[in-house]
Image (spheres, grey):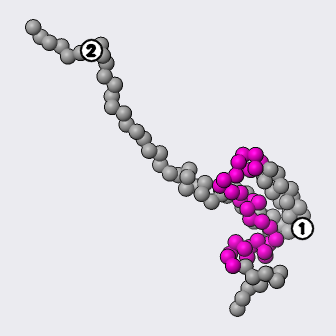
Amino acid sequence: MKTIVAGRQPVTATEFIELALGIDLELFTGSATESAMERAARLDVAHEVLAELRESAPETAAYAQSLLRTLPLGTRSNSRRPRRTVRRPAATSSIAGPAVAA
């Protein structure tokens, strides 16, 4: 059996959610490559859409609110990657040289 939403057949689960709920998931989750200015603009629009959803579809608004708390794909793995440290040899002092006993 094929699942068809509004005359379109979703291929992925994400497409199904977007078609069924009528919201763009990327509006609430963002992109790993967006700049700070793009993120601020996206969040402004997302908050306006969220305010409208709270009045018309409270369950969808709750889902969208939870999406706002997620990080874009790729951000989590980058933040948890261990840092590589470079060890440098201990500095030697030019003042203290080898002592020769006479």
Name the residue at 78% across, 53% down: 42
Residue 32 among those drawn in magenta: yes
Query: Which tag is nearer the camera, tag 1 or tag 2?
Result: 2
Judge from the rendering whether residue 32 lies leftward or rightward of residue 91; answer left or right: right
Rendered location of residue 72, percent (x, y): 66, 57
Counting every numbered tag in the picture gives 2
Judge from the rendering whether residue 94 lies leftward or rightward of residue 99; answer left or right: right
Q: Residues within 10 Å of mark 2 (few under 14, many from 20)?
A: few
Q: Element type at marker 1?
A: helix
Q: Closest to the observer: 92 or 64? A: 92
User: Quarter-wise, where is residue 45 in the image?
Assistant: bottom right
Looking at the image, the residue that sits furthest to the top is: 102
Q: Residues within 10 Å of mark 1 (few under 14, many from 20)?
A: few
Q: Amino acid at mark 1?
A: Ser
C-alpha separation, residue under disc 1 versus residue under disc 2:
79 Å
Quadrant where the N terminus is found in the figure = bottom right
Q: Amino acid at mark 2?
A: Ala
Residue 88 among those drawn in magenta: no
User: Quarter-wise, where is residue 7 in the image?
Assistant: bottom right
> Which residue in the structure is indicated by mark 2?
96
